[in-house]
Amino acid sequence: MANNRLSDLVHILVYVQMHSHNKLTSDLIASSLNTNPSLARRMMSQLKKASLLETTQGTASPKLSRSPVQITIFDVYMATLPEAPLLKVDKNTSKDCAVGHALPKVLNKYYLDIQSTAEAKMRKITIQDVINDVKMDIEHHEKETTMLNS
């Protein structure tokens, strides 16, 4: 099963930046994520530990620790503390079968290539890129809604 932690951490950073002029309680951030405030606080703590988010206890004013053009998806990915690669080879295959013996080693080579390609791409995508796309999508949705209601 895929882990959605990266998506949630990116969500928090984008939400915080796009609502930087508002009070942002963990309840409000959690509602955007459709989760509970305790989990939202833990994820914000993870971002703070990775030096991507600044928070002050007792105030509802989190902010990005640096400009959104300086924070990449790779930075956020590293904040998830990845303990395993994106793709994992099943090494518990039959050693008595030629395919079962060879496939883990062969797949590992391809998976390492996929991992390095994914990480290189993550280094090129910034939080600002995501914010720009989110804003475009919101504008598009609002135009569609206006046209439907007219």
Image (tube, rainbow, N blue to C red):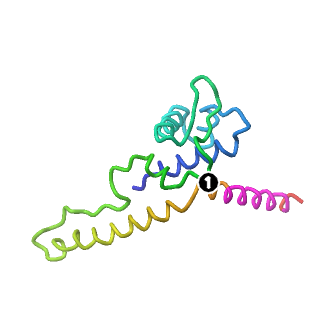
Please identify the quadrant where the C terminus is shown: bottom right
Q: Position of residue 38 (x, y in %)?
A: 51, 31
Write the residue at 49% across / 65% down. Answer: 121
Amino acid type, label 1: Val
Residue at x 38%, y 59% (from the top left corner): 86
The image quadrant that residue 94 belongs to is bottom left
Residue 126 is situated, as x and y percent measured from the top left of the image, at 58, 56
Based on the picture, tell me whether residue 138 belongs to the magenta stretch: yes
**Residues rendered magenta in the picture:** 132-147
Q: Residue at x 43, y 52 (%)?
A: 3
| Outermost residue toward the top in this view | 58
Image coordinates of residue 73 in percent, x first then y, are 52, 55
- Magenta stretch secondary structure, dominant: helix
In the rendered image, residue 15 lying in the magenta stretch gets the answer: no
Frontmost residue, 7 versus 76: 76
With respect to residue 125, does 51 lie above or below?
above
Identify the residue at image location x=57%, y=35%: 54
